[in-house]
Image (cartoon, helix red, strand yellow):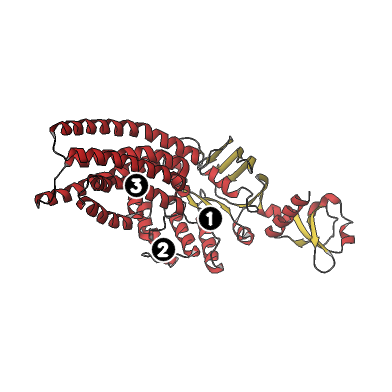
């Protein structure tokens, strides 16, 4: 079963549009949603959570159509962390806990309190006095404390220091040990996604350019770094995008299967692949 | 819906303390307009809660949580009704104490009119808030409050003057206000739900 299914979703805002977006995330996996600012990541998440109605196409989460009345009950199983923690500013963590306890039927107060302690969150302090990192930690604590099956995270690790970020990535990893638990995470920190994700979905200007298994993506591309003359020996279709390497030569993202046998290509990171693909799309 | 009302109470708890003091001050002032305003002002508390929701973007978060649009919209109405009811009861009690001390006249009918006026304000202005947001809807709200307060205050002044014919007028005004509050609320709630959906895209 797929935890998330978006089928031919279109949503036009005038100056920006999501165009024919089709995406499936298998249950038990972590999918990273990447793209530039304004590529449509947050809009996709809002469409998936039923907070925005598409002009056409269908969306379902955990097997339930998000436009159906049944989706209200299904939201109990979805933990959401947005790019900012949007809790009312005058509340403190205790009051947030009381509101969430009355919101979610499977709210685990003991687990919530454990997260507050683990994240060193001051319980009596008003939310407006929290730092950005503290706010995000509170939002993550809330999302994890109602025993969700699907976590939808929109820039959830932004603003966290590397140590806390690493700890939270471990928590997300632990979360998917249950075979029916899945995560859709959008982030600009591509190294986090490389560490965490099974699938990478790349949105560019409202279109999904690909959604591939991360390992397959890493196998598919390599980095060429040498002279421009040597790069010209390659088939033009093998070169995705190129840039000066800073030493008078060039650096390029190359499709391994189209490169001659024996060519030395460096391992491409997810960040390399995405950056070159964006450059390639802009130069096309 | 109860949880959303609880959230609103937490959010405006600090303002509520000042509001309580304001009710007592306005209730003590010897003027029909002031006494009416104390209760009608309670109808503004849902806008304060809505403004906090918008500022913190809670409305965006709530749309992704297991709250129905009906609960989100109706929660604001019920919160407003509770505020108006509580303000009317408090104001009435305070005026009763003042009347017992012999310092002024006591008029439960005037309070009832103020409460019904508050319900009318809520019913007229909440759809505007859901359609345009608190920032843009604020001017419309102040205009409505001024008109309702002025009318209710004028009626209240006639009511406390002691003339039998004027008491009959007061009774008619109460019935008209009651019908107006019921009709406006019945139209207002589905309209607010529709505007909420439009605004959420």
Q: Which residue is mark 3?
A: B44
Query: CB of mark 2 within 8 Å of CB of mark 1?
Result: no
Q: Is residue A26 visible?
A: no
- In this view of the protein, which residue sits in the foreground, A149 or B13? B13
Disc 1 crowd rating (10 Å Cα; few below 14, some 14-19, many 20+) is: some
- In this view of the protein, which residue sits in the foreground, B2 or A66? B2
- In this view of the protein, which residue sits in the foreground, A281 or B164? B164
Q: Measured from the top left, where is residue B58 in percent x and y?
A: 44, 51
- Distance of mark 3 from mark 1, alpha carbons? 31 Å
Q: Measured from the top left, where is residue B92 in percent x and y?
A: 18, 46
Disc 3 crowd rating (10 Å Cα; few below 14, some 14-19, many 20+) is: many
- Distance of mark 2 from mark 1, alpha carbons? 20 Å
Q: Are marks 3 and 2 on the same chain?
A: no
Q: Which residue is mark 2?
A: A116
Callout 1: SS:
loop
A195 horizontally vs A143: left or right: right
Q: Is residue A41 visible?
A: yes
Circle 1 marks a residue in which chain?
A
Callout 2: SS:
helix
Q: Measured from the top left, where is residue A20 in percent x and y?
A: 65, 38
Q: Are marks 3 and 1 on the same chain?
A: no
Disc 2 crowd rating (10 Å Cα; few below 14, some 14-19, many 20+) is: many
- Distance of mark 3 from mark 2, alpha carbons? 35 Å
Callout 3: SS:
helix
Residue located at (83% from left, 54% from top): A259
Of marks 3 and 2, the one in the foreground: 3
Q: Which residue is mark 1?
A: A83
Q: Measured from the top left, where is residue A57 in percent x and y?
A: 59, 35
Of marks 2 and 1, the one in the foreground: 1
Of marks 3 and 1, the one in the foreground: 3
B104 horizontally vs A211: left or right: left
- The N terminus of chain B - image quarter: top left
């Amino acid at each position: 079963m797929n935890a998330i299914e978006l089928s031919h979703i279109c949503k036009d805002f005038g100056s920006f549009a999501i165009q024919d977006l089709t995406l499936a995330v298998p249950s038990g996996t972590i999918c990273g949603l990447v793209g530039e600012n304004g590529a449509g990541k947050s809009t996709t998440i809002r469409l998936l959570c039923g907070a925005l109605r598409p002009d056409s196409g269908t969306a379902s989460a955990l097997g339930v159509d998000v436009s159906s009345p049944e989706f209200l009950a299904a939201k109990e199983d979805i933990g959401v962390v947005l790019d900012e923690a949007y809790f009312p500013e005058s509340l403190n963590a205790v009051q947030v806990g009381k509101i969430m306890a009355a919101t979610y039927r499977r709210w685990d107060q003991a687990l919530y309190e454990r997260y507050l302690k683990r994240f060193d969150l001051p319980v009596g302090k008003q939310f407006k006095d929290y730092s950005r990192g503290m706010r995000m930690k509170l939002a993550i604590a809330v999302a994890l404390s109602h025993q969700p099956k699907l976590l939808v995270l929109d820039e959830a690790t932004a603003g966290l220091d590397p140590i806390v970020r690493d700890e939270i990535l471990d928590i997300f990893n632990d979360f998917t040990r249950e075979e029916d638990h899945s995560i859709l995470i959008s982030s600009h920190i591509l190294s986090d996604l490389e560490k965490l994700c099974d699938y990478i979905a790349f949105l560019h200007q409202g279109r999904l350019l690909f959604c591939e298994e991360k390992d397959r993506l890493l196998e598919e591309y390599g980095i060429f770094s040498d002279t421009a003359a040597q790069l010209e020996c390659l088939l033009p279709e093998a070169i995705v995008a190129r840039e000066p390497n800073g030493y008078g030569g060039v650096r390029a993202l190359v499709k391994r299967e189209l490169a001659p046998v024996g060519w030395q290509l460096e391992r491409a990171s997810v960040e390399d692949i995405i950056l070159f693909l964006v450059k390639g799309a802009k130069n096309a | 819906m109860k949880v959303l009302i609880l959230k609103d109470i937490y959010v405006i708890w600090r303002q509520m303390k000042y509001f309580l003091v304001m009710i007592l001050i306005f209730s003590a002032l010897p003027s029909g307009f002031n006494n009416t305003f104390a209760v009608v002002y309670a109808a503004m508390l849902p806008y304060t809660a809505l403004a906090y929701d918008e500022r913190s973007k809670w409305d965006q978060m709530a749309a992704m949580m297991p709250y129905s649009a009906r609960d989100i919209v109706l929660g604001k109405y019920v919160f407003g009704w509770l505020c108006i009811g509580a303000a009317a009861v408090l104001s009435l009690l305070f005026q009763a104490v003042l009347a017992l001390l012999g310092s002024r006249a006591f008029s439960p009918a005037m309070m009832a009119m103020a409460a019904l006026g508050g319900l009318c304000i809520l019913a007229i202005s909440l759809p505007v808030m859901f359609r345009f947001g608190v920032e843009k809807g604020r001017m419309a709200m102040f205009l409505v409050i001024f008109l309702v307060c002025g009318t209710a205050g004028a009626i209240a002044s006639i009511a406390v003057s002691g003339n039998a014919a004027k008491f009959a007028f007061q009774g008619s005004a109460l019935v008209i206000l009651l019908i107006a509050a019921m009709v406006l609320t019945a139209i207002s709630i589905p309209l607010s739900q529709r505007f909420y959906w439009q605004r959420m895209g």
